[in-house]
Amino acid sequence: NTPEQIRLIGTLRHAVVPSMFLLAIAVLAADRLLSHAGAGGIAWVRRGIGAGLAVSLVGAIAMSADGRGESFRSRGPSWSTSVAEARGSCEDALETKKIAIPTAPAAAQWSLSLSCERLLADRG
């Protein structure tokens, strides 16, 4: 794949796991500061830093969450609409043929090639 093709795909769903590993570093650091604070005058400082780090982490995650649920795939064609249109095209056709059903993401021009016979036989 070229860099231009990769940019069309957008954020990859596989980026979640590496991001979680990076966030785990902050969580482990906060845990270490909180659990190893020890006794004495410096203990409250360490606990304060650990608590501040934990609160900052939770706040950063909460603020970065996008509740819209929109992704690159959500801008593509609807599967049910595409199948209905393909069935209509197959019913209008005089001969059995293959038809391409577009799928998301539309920018990548993905599609499923299916025979009209199979598409019409699988009505539900």
Image: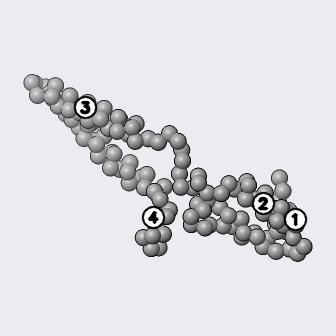
| Badge 3 amino acid | Gly
In this orientation, does residue 35 appear? no
Q: How far apart are labels 4 and 2 at the CA level?
A: 30 Å
Task: Give the image quarter of residue 11.
Answer: bottom left
First along the sequence among labels 1 and 4: 4
Give the residue number, with chain letter if any, for mark 1.
91
Give the residue number, with chain letter if any, for mark 3.
52
Callout 4: SS: helix
Q: How far apart are labels 1 and 3 at the CA level?
A: 64 Å
Tell me which residue sits at (79%, 70%) in the image: 115
Q: Position of residue 116 (x, y in %)?
A: 82, 68
Q: Position of residue 120 (x, y in %)?
A: 85, 63
Closest to the observer, 122 or 7: 7
**Residue farthest to the left, as pictured:** 41
First along the sequence among labels 1 and 3: 3
The mark found on residue 7 in the picture is 4
Tell me which residue sits at (28%, 43%) in the image: 26
| Badge 4 amino acid | Arg
Give the residue number, with chain letter if any, for mark 2.
85
Q: Residues within 10 Å of mark 2 (few under 14, many from 20)?
A: few
First along the sequence among labels 3 and 4: 4
Q: How far apart are labels 3 and 4 at the CA level?
A: 36 Å
First along the sequence among labels 4 and 2: 4
**Are dots 4 and 2 in contact, CB under 8 Å?**
no
First along the sequence among labels 3 and 2: 3
**For discs 3 and 2, the disc positioned in front in the rendered view:** 2
Q: How far apart are labels 1 and 4 at the CA level?
A: 38 Å
Tell me which residue sits at (56%, 64%) in the image: 107
Tell me which residue sits at (10%, 24%) in the image: 40
